[in-house]
Amino acid sequence: MTTPAAIDLRSDTVTRPDEQMLAAMATADVGDDVLDHDPTTRTLEERVAQLLGTPAALWVPSGTMGNLIALMLHLKRGDRFLAPRGAHVLNHELGSAAWLAGGMPDPLEWDAGPGRPTAEAVRSQASLTMAYDALHTTLLCLENTHNGAGGAIVPPHEHARLAAAAKELGLKVHLDGARLWNASVALGVPPAALTVGVDSVQVCLSKGLGAPVGSVLAGDVEFIKAGRRVRKMLGGGVRQGGVVAAAGLVALDRIDALADDHDNARILAEGLVDRGWQVTAPQTNMILAAVPDVQLTLQRLRSVGVLAVPMNGQIRFVTHRDVSKSDVEEALRRIGEAGI
């Protein structure tokens, strides 16, 4: 019996560069980014800064490095920082916020909805006595969309209230916007509308936009100047970076196409509900499904060539540019025929 070709719904990081992106990489204008600032990398950074409404930006190899650079610059050793429960900086970056940046993480509950704390929670949790041995809370880390909450969106008015509350308390604000493009498209607002009041923001090019590698950290000129030094210290100083920056420029032209991923996520979610699954309605390109036995269900899905991953005791499916509407319909057909 022939095994069906896999439909990979594990993540939007599994995409592969298409011919247009590969051609741009092959013909990129390059230079030594450590010595002279690679020209294509500079163009990418300037374009991202403009999209995010910040004065400057810095290409980094990964979102994890971008977040870590921000935390290393914003925190002193032993400072407490707040982040929504389940945030990527808390659960999926190997403890680097504490290990390398020296910060004491403290999670905020989702009292405004999935992945979303309220401004009141920030004020309450950041308020400490002035005793010399008390933790100093100095940073609020936000995430939009929130991966652990299934791609949940923080809308502009809530984001603005959170940032304002942080500023009232003298806190810096870092935004992990790895999938900020998805939030922007889903809400129909410019990305800069979702960065109001932040001191730094990281956005990813290798998730839904399809670049093979790379994220961008943005902030003011002095922050990025300092960030460039920390990037080098962490081993992120690249040479002919224009080869991968060119892929990022092509990726930025595809932001609007994320709407197709969101549509496909809705089709998948509705199809799973029709087949008796308990599914959280997707806000962007992620679907969380509650099942009695996560590992057994993943095994059964793999047996019919549908790939997914566990996430917070549920199963996560992620639609992306390399999965078409017909692929989603085929996945649903396989799941239905197998009685999963």
Image (cartoon, grey):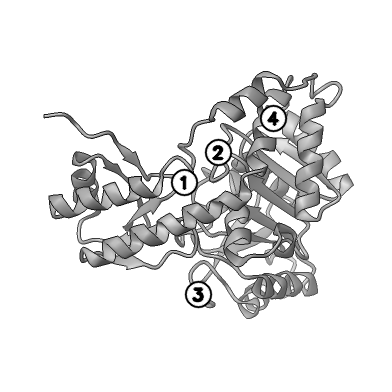
In the picture shown, does residue 111 fall above or below 322? below
For mark 1, what is the residue? Answer: 320
Sequence-wise first label, 1 or 3: 3
Report the quarter where the N terminus lies. top left
Mark 4 or 3, closer to the camera:
4
Relative depth, front residue between 213 and 90: 213
Q: Position of residue 332 (x, y in %)?
A: 26, 53
Q: Secondary structure at mark 3?
A: loop
Sequence-wise first label, 4 or 3: 3
Q: Which amino acid is tagged 3?
A: Gly
In the picture shown, does residue 188 fall above or below 52? below
Residue in view at x 68 percent, y 67 percent: 134
For mark 4, what is the residue? Answer: 246
Distance between the alpha carbons at the discs numbered 1 and 3 = 25 Å
Sequence-wise first label, 1 or 4: 4
Mark 3 or 2, closer to the camera:
2
Q: Position of residue 325 (x, y in %)?
A: 39, 50
